[in-house]
Image (cartoon, helix red, strand yellow):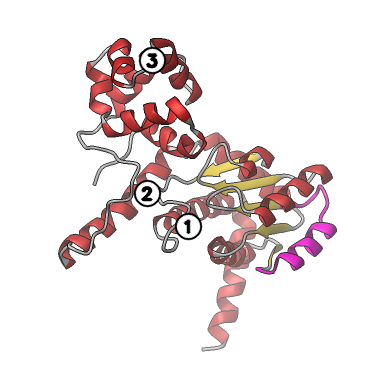
Amino acid sequence: MNITPKCILQIKRLYPELTGKYKDIADYILANPEKIIRHKVKDIAGDCNCDDALIIRFCQKIGYSGFSEFKMSIATGFLPVRLDIADKEFSPEYSFLKLKRNFLDNNLKALHDTLGHLEEETIKQAVQILSRATKIYLFASGNSGIVAEDIEIKLMRLGFNAIFHQDAEFSKIFMGLCNPDDAILAISFSGETASVCGLAAIAGKKGVPVIAITNYPNSRLTGLADVTLLTASDEKIFRLGPMTSRIAQYYIIDFLIINLALENMERAEEYIVRTHEMIRKDK
């Protein structure tokens, strides 16, 4: 299993927003990361049929001061493997053993890459918002709704007043009832889910803090959130179903829950014992 360098992850995350020569440069780097380490900016520009300045602007667009800093980032994080924007992990020709191995590697890679982007300060901010909240409203739809159901139960077991409903109309009712003492936890892989983003926008106008869980740092949801927890899954937006993306979301949620429990240990212990005793009574 290989862990994707942060600079490559950043290109993949921003890839849907790139156009023209910027996309050509991204394709070149993703297909030939080792060449960035060995070559000068003029060599890369020549291969991409553009001028040096455009390569430098591309590096700045993805968060680096210039080509030198980007080159150093690749050199320190690069692993000897070709990274491709296309999804080539599975094939009908694969043996059952290879399919099992690739499936495991993909999931582990998503976890490791997500861990690499998880910042302590971001988790602390999210924990503080949730700890102060009178009620925690969860907004998600479709596959992310399954993840929201999971965190709703975990929050309730810690003694928090968590509320979630898959139906978007019910979510609108909740949004009408919430106030700045509450908190919103919005989950969307793409960060562009219309219903979720719409509710997050209303929350912002009402002064309700929003925590987002998404895969894309420049998505609409990220722009609407006070705190964003990023997953790092290579899954395409148009896919068979959530695989590595949902595992990455569960990882973020469980890590958040652990930190929330540690921050509110006395209450967490009390409610966990109470719910456990209630469950045992039914057996």
Over which residues does the magenta segment extend? 166-183
Q: Is residue 58 magenta?
A: no
Q: Which amino acid does the dot numbered 1 rest on?
A: Tyr
Disc 2 residue type (three-letter)? Ala
Residue occupying image coordinates x 35% and y 23%? 73
Is label 1 in a helix, a strand or a loop?
helix
Q: Secondary structure at mark 3?
A: helix
Q: Is there CB contact under 8 Å for labels 2 and 1?
A: no
Position in image of residue 210 (x %, y %): 69, 46
Above or below residue 173? Residue 224 is above
Q: Nearer the viewer, residue 152 or 22?
A: 22
Q: Which residue is mark 3?
A: 67
Where does the image place residue 156, in percent across and percent down from the top left? Answer: 64, 65
Q: Which mark is residue 27?
A: none
Disc nearer the start of the sequence (3/1)? 3
Q: How many neighbours does mark 2 have within 10 angstroms: few (below 14), some (14-19), or many (20 or more)?
A: many
Residue, disc 2: 110
CA gap, disc 3 to disc 1? 35 Å
Q: Nearer the viewer, mark 3 or mark 2?
A: 3
User: Position of 201 compared to 122: left or right?
Assistant: right
Q: Which mark is residue 250?
A: 1
Residue occupying the point 28% across, 38% down:
83
